[in-house]
Image (cartoon, rainbow, N blue to C red):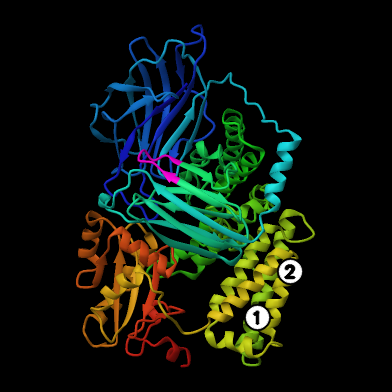
Amino acid sequence: MLIIAYLCPIHPYKYHMKNTFFFLLSLVLFGACTSNPREFTNPRSYADNTCDWMKKLRITHVEFADTATILTFSYKSSLPSYRLSVGPQTYLSDEKDRHYKVLFMTEHMLGEFFSAGPEGTTFHVGFEPLPAGTRIFDMIEGMGSNYFKIIGIHDSTYTLAKPKFSRKELAEAKQIRSSIFKPGVVTLRGTIVGYDHNDGFRTYKLHYSDYPADINNTLALDIDSEGNFESSFDVNYFFGGAIVDHNNNWYEFIAQPGDTLNITFYKDGSVNYSLSDGRPYLLRNYVRFSSGLNVVDNSKFQFTDSIDWPSVLDYAWKCKKRGHDYIDYVASKYNLTAFEYQYANIMMENSILESYLDCRMDISYQYITYITSTEHVDTTKIIEITENSDRILADSAGLNFIADFTANDSLMLIMPVQWVIFNRYKYDRAFYKSVVNLDSLKGKVDDATLYALESYMTDSIHLANDMKLFGASEPSLFGKICMMQDIDRHLETLNTILILYAVANPDSVLTSYMTKMKGLLNDANLEARADRIYQDYFRKQVPYWDLPECRGKEVLKSILANYPGKYVYIDFWSTGCGPCISGIKRCYNNRRELMTGKHDKFVMIFITSDPEEAYEPFRKEWLEGAESYRLSQDDYNVLAGMFNFSAIPHHEMITPDGRAVTNVPEMFVVNPDDPDPELQSKQ
């Protein structure tokens, strides 16, 4: 019997930089004989039921009484303002969608808002009684992207069994995985059941990534009056991404080249996936439980000055063990295919690795926190902080945890969070730290040659460290993808003059660097992808580009009409984005200077889609008098699609004749009296 309890936490600031957090709490209960206990205390769980860093909510007691089914919750919040409400909307639901209404709540008034605080609180919720035969249950917990989910409860006597797959099933999974790098076209067709243009939104967003090229793409999907949208993409391998709805809920999917994937969205938040040719969707069973894959309490990985690294490492190993147990359980319950089982395990491992590497990144660069928070920087203190960081990061036990992960599985190319993992792994000081000093060559060789030599030496050292970590004779796929991204990143760093130099001088050291990097990949698919990166980048090296004819251009034109004859610097931001807020505060003096009217060629504007209750207080404090715009989510989506960004802060600069600048400089280096980037690059 499936039991679902909906408990709704409410936060005054509903909108996060990426997600709006609403939480769904569900329990899976199984019927059994009445001879078993009617109560369970502190049932064992395989994952911390933690909503990211914000709160902790767990079941400590379950009682099957004749008059009610009573669930006892322990609730903690690291943010005093985070509140929980249990009201008439809370209920239990079984597999036949029969609802058991909430009857009462003790310790707090039913329906009231309350804050638990870091000390926590305990409360009891009584529901209409379950059928008398329900006495044994199994518990596994996990967090979804936009809600909190607990699947099942189980006591200490429950034994998990490993799923078994036939040779035929394993062969089918192998065949699917062998087509990872097959190029083709993927078409997405979406239908929103019961949609009406008067619902207040006319676009969804699509996010997808090209990990080898280190490119994150964002597109606005226009919804017609019938609630339909469609888009097609040329892809070089499996296509993985997420559709984001008007409430910022993320719906992840994957598709093989050649697929036409139909996605149906229902009013209750459920989604159905199907393929037009009648084949079963690759993750048809996986989607029923995938929200529980995040088994990590991110607060355990948050860096502090007194971080207990052995405890962090111990928790990471426990997360991994619980994650595999969880997937073993649901693989049997939901009849996962062999491919779904393999995908789920890689997905789970990567969610843990992301949090773990994120913590290591904080340790790697904690000296930056010291520098930015201290008025008078002490050089001795910086050395002390750096040495302590290096000591922690060089710990063999910590490195062994990374080495235990699957580093050569091509499925990682379609993981939604993989770009973060590649970035953190690349710049972890245990691998990236190297002594590359070419000062003796400065002034003796051109800048392009110097840059190429430094890049090649740094990348070679990183790949050598990768081989040492995984004990292999060649770099792991993980390391190769990081290096591919570095190629793309290096090309972005090079200014137009150096790129043109490389094109005009095919025998230069810079061109040789590109050839050597491609050769290190030792993989035909990745080498071909590297060739496309080079070709695309060289082709795009122009100072400006023309905006496409689309709805985003019309939205932008209505804003630019206020600034005729000016270079317009645009800052896309949100109140829920820490780096955005930091950047706005740092450029405060620049903005005040621009507002004096002395610089008639240049203006800086700010664009967000934040709700008014979050936007207005910040605007009054930090953007008073500035050129600031709060757009509808639809208008913001089409701008994000036109400029192709998913992360913020994001900056663009538009010329007086309406073209976009290719390489947008930092606000702090723009000369407001002479903002033309082409002229500045020649100075």
On screen, residue 357 versus residue 477, left or right, reads left
389 above or below 44? below
Q: Say which amino acid is labelled 1.
A: Ala
Of residues 225 and 32, the one drawn nearer to the viewer in this rendering: 225
The question of residue 265 being in magenta is answered with: yes
Query: Is residue 180 visible to the viewer in this orientation of the structure?
Result: yes
Query: Is residue 437 visible to the viewer in this orientation of the structure?
Result: no
Q: Residue furthest top?
A: 35
Q: Say which amino acid is labelled 2.
A: Leu
Of residues 493 and 570, the one drawn nearer to the viewer in this rendering: 570
On screen, residue 508 versus residue 284, left or right, reads right
Q: Position of residue 380 (x, y in %)?
A: 51, 68
Identified at 52% across, 29% down, the residue is 45
Kind of element beneath mark 1: helix
**3D distance between C-alphas at marks 1 and 2:** 15 Å
Q: Position of residue 304 (x, y in %)?
A: 46, 51
Identified at 66% across, 48% down, the residue is 405
Mark earlier in primary sequence (1, 2): 1
Identified at 36% across, 45% down, the residue is 21
Q: Position of residue 264 (x, y in %)?
A: 44, 45
Q: How would you classify the magenta stretch by its main secondary structure? A: loop
The question of residue 177 being in magenta is answered with: no
Residue beneath disc 2: 520
On screen, residue 243 versus residue 346, left or right, reads left
Crowd band around label 1 with a 10 angstrom C-alpha radius: few (<14), some (14–19), many (20+): many
Quarter holding residue 392: bottom right
Disc number lying in front (1 or 2): 2
Kind of element beneath mark 2: helix
Q: Position of residue 257 (x, y in %)?
A: 61, 56
Which residue range is magenta in the image? 264-271
Residue beneath disc 1: 452
Crowd band around label 2 with a 10 angstrom C-alpha radius: few (<14), some (14–19), many (20+): some
